[in-house]
Image (tube, rainbow, N blue to C red):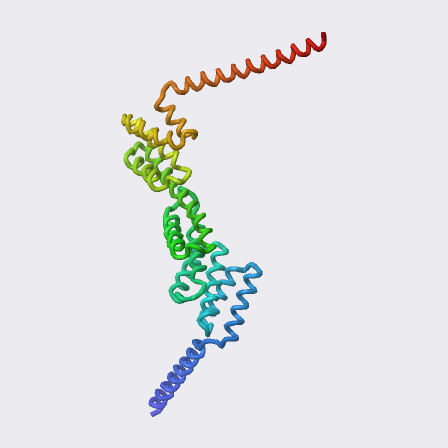
């Protein structure tokens, strides 16, 4: 009988424990009131003013989850993403921005967040030797943004950045093409260079791409192709160093002619100086006598 009472007592204790746990869980998941949410948001603002962006981002996320008004939650999310972006935590910022765009598609700050998301990819662009994915993703987002918001101040900034991205993409193509040239993989090298010519003609790398094509065609014995490409280079950029190199490649006497011209030019300069000195001396002699 004692054992039976003992079992009943244990059951009562277990039920009491579960009831307390349930109550504690209910209390812990109950959202704080608006005053608490605003207090946490203000903590985030104070931390941001002190330059403590990581801590501020966490506070804004905490505030977002308990804000009673959707507009306030959206604003807290924007602030959290901005803080991560400010300290170059781009992956974290992109996660916050994607979450924001999913949860608050009608919020007034959507254009600004889309702009910051594009910048988060853009800022990861390092140089032509690095991963090309941030470049391509940034280009895609910027093009989408400009298409949707053509007349905003953000679009003007992104249009400028788009030009830099194209230069980076062209630089990447040139870098890879030079590697293929070095390893004598001519076909992939030609394809890379043609991509620059066809898709990045407004960049600073167009002249080098054309010259490299002239070089490859010449080395492969495709003289006509080499000359045609050199003509395009000469027609558009006949004062540049890359055209000069292509011209020198196709005209073996070019270097000799260049040296002769320089020598002749120097001789003419020396002769002109001598004549000038003689004239001055003659005038002095006349004045003296």
Image position of 180 (left or right of 91): left
How many numbered dots are placed on residues in this image? Answer: 0
- What residue is rendered at 37% in x and 41% in y? 200
Q: Against 196, is 246 above or below?
A: above
Classify residue 39 as left or right of residue 226.
right
Q: Is residue 212 above or below residue 158?
A: above
Residue displayed at 69% across by 9% down: 286
Which of the two residues, 258 or 38, is positioned nearer the viewer here? 258
x%, y% of residue 275? Answer: 58, 12
Along the line of sight, which residue is nearer the eye, 184 or 266? 266
Q: Residue furthest bottom?
A: 1
Q: Quadrant of residue 233?
A: top left
Q: Position of residue 65 (x, y in %)?
A: 44, 70
Tell which of 263 and 43 is nearer to you. 263
Above or below 65: residue 222: above
Residue 24 in picture, x, y percent from top left: 44, 79
* Residue at image coords 37%, 49%: 136
Q: Position of residue 133 (x, y in %)?
A: 36, 49
The C terminus sits in image quarter: top right
Quarter holding the N terminus is: bottom left
Q: Quadrant of residue 49?
A: bottom right
């Amino acid at each position: 009988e004692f054992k039976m009472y003992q079992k009943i007592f244990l059951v009562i204790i277990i039920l009491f424990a579960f009831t307390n746990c349930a109550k504690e869980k209910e209390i812990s998941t109950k959202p704080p009131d608006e005053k608490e949410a605003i207090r946490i948001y203000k903590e985030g603002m104070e931390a941001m003013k002190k330059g403590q962006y990581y801590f501020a981002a966490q506070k804004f996320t905490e505030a977002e989850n308990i804000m009673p008004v959707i507009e306030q939650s959206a604003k807290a999310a924007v602030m959290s993403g901005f803080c991560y972006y400010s300290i170059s935590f781009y992956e974290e910022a992109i996660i916050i921005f994607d979450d924001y765009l999913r949860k608050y598609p009608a919020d007034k700050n959507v254009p600004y967040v889309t702009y910051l998301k594009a910048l988060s990819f853009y800022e990861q662009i390092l140089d032509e030797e690095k991963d090309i994915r941030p470049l391509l993703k940034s280009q895609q987002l910027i093009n989408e943004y400009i298409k949707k918001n053509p007349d905003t101040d953000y679009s003007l900034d992104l249009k400028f950045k788009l030009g830099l991205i194209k230069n980076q993409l062209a630089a990447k193509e040139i870098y890879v093409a030079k590697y293929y040239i070095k390893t004598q993989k001519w076909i992939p090298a030609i394809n890379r260079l043609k991509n620059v010519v066809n898709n990045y003609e407004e960049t600073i790398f167009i002249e080098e791409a054309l010259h490299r094509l002239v070089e490859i065609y010449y080395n492969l014995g495709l003289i006509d192709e080499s000359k045609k490409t050199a003509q395009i280079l000469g027609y558009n950029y006949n004062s540049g160093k890359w055209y000069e190199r292509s011209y020198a490649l196709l005209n073996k006497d070019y270097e000799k002619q260049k040296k002769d011209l320089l020598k002749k030019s120097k001789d003419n300069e020396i002769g002109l100086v001598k004549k000038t000195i003689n004239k001055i001396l003659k005038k002095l002699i006349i004045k003296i006598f």
